Image (cartoon, grey):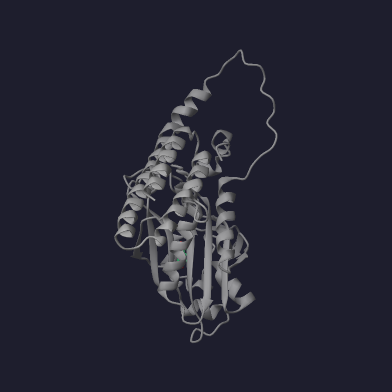
Amino acid sequence: MKVQLEKIKQEFQKGLNEVSDVLMLEEFEKRFFSRRSGEMTEAMKNLKDLSGDARKEMGRLANEIKNELLEMLDQKRVDFNRGDSALLVKTEAIDVTQPKLPKQIGGHLHPMTIVHNELEDLFTSMGFMVLDGPELESTYYSFETLNIPATHPARENMDTFYIKDHSDWCMRPHTSPVQVRAMQKYGAPLRAVVSGRCFRNEATDASHDHTFYQMEGLVVDREISIANLIGTMKELLSGVLRRDVEVRLRPGYFPFVEPGFELDMKCLVCSGIGCGACKHSGWVETLPCGLVHPKVIEAGGLDPNEWTGFAFGLGSMRLAMQKYGIEDIRHLHAGDLRFLNQF
Ligand code: DAH
């Protein structure tokens, strides 16, 4: 087993030197750490055949090597990120003698589409339905049904774009309205995710855009607990990021959940040192979540004495940034082929 581990390490080091872009890095990461057939994952599975001290010793060694390899991956991701701007400057230089370039035909999926597809696969494998909801939404579903009455200060925090001359309609500021729509349509028990665009009248910076993506999740069943919520959130993050991530849970206030939480993850773009992607704090707010408020269950047409639930609203652009080491959210909507062609 020791020999096998050393061999994996050597191959990893050799292979990593040949990785020259983010996509290759992702493939490379899969080769070693994919949950199904990653070389390292497989090696770790063999531990269970050992017994007693040998198992303890090999377990420790395997963990040491695993962490070393993960650190190397993080470092490479950070390097790519720093290198980006240097690369752009170089390719921007104009060579006036160059003949016209052939037109590029063909295309590929946008990184956000890749991330949403992966999330949807993951959730369907856990028995969730994938739903959709309108981007032009009523204030009734956007706020009222979510326990945010007209006078509630949370409405102001949302910086909503209202429709001119139709103040009871808006561009949805979050995907949460689909929670109530889903309960009304499908009843309980229910497991659903909804990914889509949301809009807020925000000044943009490296971690905010006026148009952004969320993935909402809702589970309604009998006796749902915080343990169900946390277990699912961890599955979500490790499923998409293909590694164990460090998370912290803080209390968070959202009128439609009680209790509510903010689940933050250690920034993978800078490994927690601080960068534009994490507002220089080392932590990224990724997953606000909580247990569904009885009033919301009621608005969904269900009896809150019988049904309970948990919900989350994943900032999926932020997750994509973490996954690919993107330091500025605005790249994702800029339509710049130099950026997009890396995926
Ligand atoms: N809709 C909230 C927002 O955009 C995020 C959110 C928080 C969604 C908690 C949830 C939740 O489902 O449980 O700010």
Tell me what residue is drawn at x 43 percent, y 68 percent.
231
Apparent side of residue 254 relative to residue 130 in the rendered image (left or right)? left
Residue farthest to the bottom? 305
Residue at position x 55%, y 19% in the image = 94
197 or 123, nearer to the observer: 123
Q: Residue 157, image x and y in percent?
A: 43, 60
Quarter of the image where the C terminus is located: top right
Q: Is residue 155 visible?
A: no
Q: Is residue 104 above or below residue 286?
A: above
Res 151 quadrant in image: bottom left
Residue farthest to the top? 97
Q: Nearer the viewer, residue 158 or 67?
A: 67
Q: Is residue 193 visible?
A: yes
- Residue 165 position within the rendered picture, expressed as x and y whole percent measured from the top left: 61, 60
Residue at position x 47%, y 47% from top? 32
Q: Quadrant of residue 299?
A: bottom right
Q: Where is 204 relative to 223, above or below?
A: above
Q: In this view of the protein, which residue sits in the foreground, 207 or 343? A: 343
Q: Residue at x 50, y 72 (%)?
A: 146
Closer to us: 67 or 298: 67
* Quarter-of-image position of residue 52: bottom left
How many numbered markers are drawn?
A: 0
The percent coordinates of residue 136 (x first, y second) are 62, 60
- Asked if 302 appears above or below 153 in the picture, the reply is below
x, y percent for residue 222: 50, 82
